[in-house]
Amino acid sequence: MDKSKRFIPYGRQWIDEDDINAVVEVLESDYLTTGPKIEEFEMGLTKYTGAKYAVVMSSGTAALHAACFAAGLKEGDEVITTPITFAASANCILYMGAKPVFADIDPRTYNISPDDIRNKVTKKTKAIIPVHFTGQPCDMDEILKIAKEYNLKIIEDAAHAIGAKYRGKKIGSIGDMTTFSFHPVKHITAGEGGAVVTNDKKLFRKLMLFRTHGITRQRNDLIGYGGKWYYEQQCLGYNYRMTDIQAALGVSQLKKADRFLGIRKAYIKMYNEAFAKAGEIEIPYQLDGADSSWHLYIIKLRLESLDCSREQIFEELGECGIGVNVHYIPVYYHPHYKKYGYQKGLCPNAEEFYERIITLPLFPKMDKEDVSYVISKVLDIIQKHTK
């Protein structure tokens, strides 16, 4: 196939025959939801991440909401997070009536800056939601120190980071709670879906309760008792259950997670080797001790060396059939957040970063020819516009 006629999206799922068979098996079974595949997927996640408990949810956003509930967030509380993330990382704070406080990013890693976290802590601060952006772990040593000093909960948003490691530890085994996403562009997919993992049994029970309307049937957890049929709603929860159909796909995909990660890393090597030679492009920096899972590959343009805008390069790559993207618009730029009084200038590093970035295609279903094609077109366009 002529690659110039082919569209390469920035991300895409990889579904094999074994994935399809796993879903069909559930469709032919007695349980389409709240069945045995849920527990199987949860057990698989604990084994993979090293966490003691896992609770799968209907989406990554539901997982974040549940984690904020389990952390006990309420109206008047503040939670520190990054502006360079999908809006869900901050929306989950608003769901609880709390206030998102945005800390600036480290200009090297593009992750939340521990120094600015410390600057933003107040008496109202109750938690930190660090986002492992692009799959690169945040500086968790420093974040853990801050959390311990001020008695704060840590909810790691690892939507990009399943399989990543920080100082040899899998992401998912470090903070109080860690959330994952299984959207189709992520490392593994369940169609939709998410999960929260934790080592804390009390948090685990709260997460389980929140997922099912706040209702429990567990005899040991009941406040009253009215017979074998009896159940209780103990809090205002949500219907955030994952189906067995999704869980079956998740179980099958999780078995391939390390293979997918290996392919991503091979393509990253190709990108880095090619773009490191281009003075107009800044390639991703990797923090010492961090082993990224490489959900996204983002180049930062040195626009002062170019005779065009980022938008023009974005459009020209699109015309070549390359599905570039931008991750992300700073959360507080969105009209909804302006209602809360957030204004430009709040996080200068994040804002400067946003103005210069382009996300290139990166997913295991690509082949090396796709990667080489993307590289050649990026370099051709950059060379054409170099001053």
Image: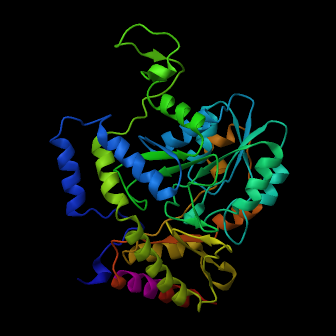
* Horizontal side of residue 292 vs 250, given as left or right: right
Residue 306: % across, % down: 63, 83
Q: Residue at 64% of width from left, 68% of height from top?
A: 167
The vertical placement of 320 against 127, above or below, is below
Q: Viewer-proximal residue, 136 or 50?
A: 50
In the figure, 28 relative to 362: above or below? above
Q: Position of residue 290 (x, y in %)?
A: 63, 70
Is 377 contained in the magenta span? yes
At 52% from the left and 76% from the top, the residue drawn is 313
Residue 187 image position (x, y, % from top left)? 42, 62
The quadrant in which the C terminus is found is bottom right
Which of 292/47 is in front?
47
Residue 349 lies in magenta, yes or no?
no
Which of the 4 image quarters holds residue 307? bottom right
Looking at the picture, tell me which residue is in the foreground, 242 or 78.
242
Q: Is residue 182 visible?
A: no
Quadrant of residue 115 in the image? bottom right
Residue that sits furthest to the left in the current view: 28
Over which residues does the magenta segment extend?
370-378
**Main structural element of the magenta stretch: helix, strand or loop?**
helix
Residue projecting furthest to the top: 226
